[in-house]
Amino acid sequence: MIKVAIAGPRGRMGQEAVHTIMEKDNMELVAVLDHRELASNLKDYDQFTYDVPVYLDLQQLISTTKPDVLIDLTTPEAVYAHTKVALENGVRPVIGTTGFTDEQLQELTELAAKEKIGAIIAPNFAVGAVLMMKFSAMAAKYMPDVEIIELHHDQKLDAPSGTAVKTAQLIQENRPSHAQGHLDEKETIAGARGADFDGMRIHSVRLQGLVAHQEVLFGGEGQMLTIRHDSYNRTSFMSGVKLCVEKVIQLDHLVYGLENIL
């Protein structure tokens, strides 16, 4: 039985994760971490009927309930500190929040190695999204002119998305570094061409009604290849969450990206 704690139970992803862990025979939800003092037990929340204690302090949660795994689905501002506290206390973090800096990722990677404890940071838990990233990396070897358009709900805090950044990093491994577009192009409105990542462009769309979507456009002479993935609801992420909880127990280092454990 894997003892699990969840940070961010009231968010849309958090709610799905709570239901998912409660339904698993090999997992036990021992506690949740909230940033607001609404109630001391999940059964007193409007969204739940489960008898699970609620904590406001992660250190206290760990000391009292001793989880094996912390699933963190909070905000970019909080997740780095949560991950660090978990690793320092022997709890394996499974992180679905994006927005880490390169320096933070490096520090957490070194901390996990020092503590000899597993950790998984997954920019996207959907298996289809991971396949989209893998296929894009393959295509870039043959069609190196590429732009990424990621589309998310209007409450997402970071832009571009972690999935878009991870996709660009994977493409970068197979794509010769070069600028795209006309050499003398000029933005008449700043930002019109999107963010520049090693010469390729990333565009972020934020609108009501969206969940998580991305398309990668490859241009060639007389042709275009589009690789697209759509998450229509958050249940699409739960198979990846379950897989990460089971896999992180077996690791002794930090893994960045679901594609590395599939």
Image (cartoon, rainbow, N blue to C red):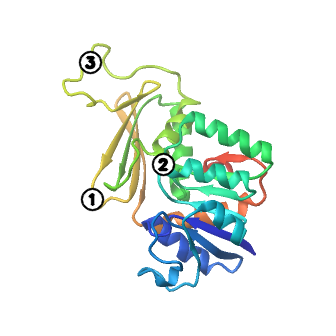
Mark 2 surroundings within 10 Å by alpha-carbon count, few (fewer than 14), some (14 through 19), many (20 or more): some
Q: Nearer the viewer, residue 47 or 188?
A: 47
- In percent of the image, x 55 and y 38: which residue is there? 137
Picture coordinates of residue 97 (x, y %)? 51, 53
Picture coordinates of residue 153 (x, y %)? 34, 56
Identify residue type, mark 2: Pro
Mark 3 surroundings within 10 Å by alpha-carbon count, few (fewer than 14), some (14 through 19), many (20 or more): few
Provide the secondary structure element on which disc 2 rests. Answer: helix
Quadrant hosting residue 194: top left
Q: Are marks 3 and 1 in contact (CB under 8 Å)?
A: no
Q: Earlier in the sequence, mark 3 or mark 2?
A: 2
Is label 1 or label 2 in front?
2
- In percent of the image, x 61 and y 48: which residue is there? 257
Quarter occupied by the C terminus: bottom right
Q: CA distance from mark 1 to mark 2?
A: 21 Å
Q: In the rendering, which numbered label is found on residue 76? A: 2
Picture coordinates of residue 147 (x, y %)? 39, 35
Quadrant hosting residue 106: top right
Q: In the rendering, which numbered label is found on residue 185? A: 3
- Decide if residue 155 is in sight here: yes
Determine which residue is flagged by label 1.
208
Is label 3 or label 1 in front?
1
Identify residue type, mark 1: Gln
Q: In the rendering, which numbered label is found on residue 109? A: none
